[in-house]
Image (spheres, rainbow, N blue to C red):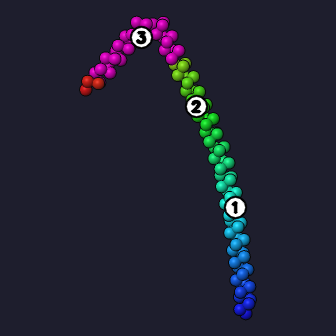
Amino acid sequence: MKNDIGGLSDQIADAAGDIGAVAREQARRGLKHARANMGSMAADASDRLAVVADTAQSRALSIADSLEDAIRERPLPALALVLGFGFLVGLVWRR
């Protein structure tokens, strides 16, 4: 009976070792998969950020061009607007 218990103990120890090896292998695979996904996610985020930056830059240039055209077409009203805005900023700043 002691031999049977000893043999059973050895089988349980071997099974626990096998389970540990399988768990380590699955953990390695999961880590490898996670690393691959992080690289892909970083590349996607970088691409999206580049698109947003390009869009913002093109809109800023469009607004600047529109503003420049408006100032060239009507310089006196543009000057009056800037002076009025400066006056308002001065009033607010003083308080």
How would you rate the neighbour count of disc 3 (Cα within 10 Å): few for under 14, some for 14-19, many for 20 or more?
Answer: some
Where the C terminus falls, by quadrant?
Answer: top left
Asked which secondary structure carries label 3, the reply is helix
Mark 3 or mark 2, which is nearer the start of the sequence? 2
How would you rate the neighbour count of disc 2 (Cα within 10 Å): few for under 14, some for 14-19, many for 20 or more?
Answer: few
x then y, percent, for residue 66: 52, 15
84 left or right of 11 in image: left
The residue positioned 70% from the left and 72% from the top of the image is 17
Label for residue 52?
2
Residue extending furthest toward the bottom: 1
Mark 2 or mark 1, which is nearer the start of the sequence? 1
Q: Nearer the viewer, mark 2 or mark 3?
A: 2
- Residue type at numbered disc 1: Gln
Please report the bounds of the magenta region as a residue range: 64-92
Rendered image quadrant of residue 61: top right
The residue positioned 69% from the left and 74% from the top of the image is 16
Label for residue 26?
1
Mark 3, residue position: 78
x then y, percent, for residue 90: 29, 20
x then y, percent, for residue 92: 29, 24
Disc 2 to disc 3, how far (Cα)? Answer: 31 Å
Q: Nearer the viewer, residue 67 or 9?
A: 9
- Residue type at numbered disc 2: Val
Figure check: 46 above or below 81: below
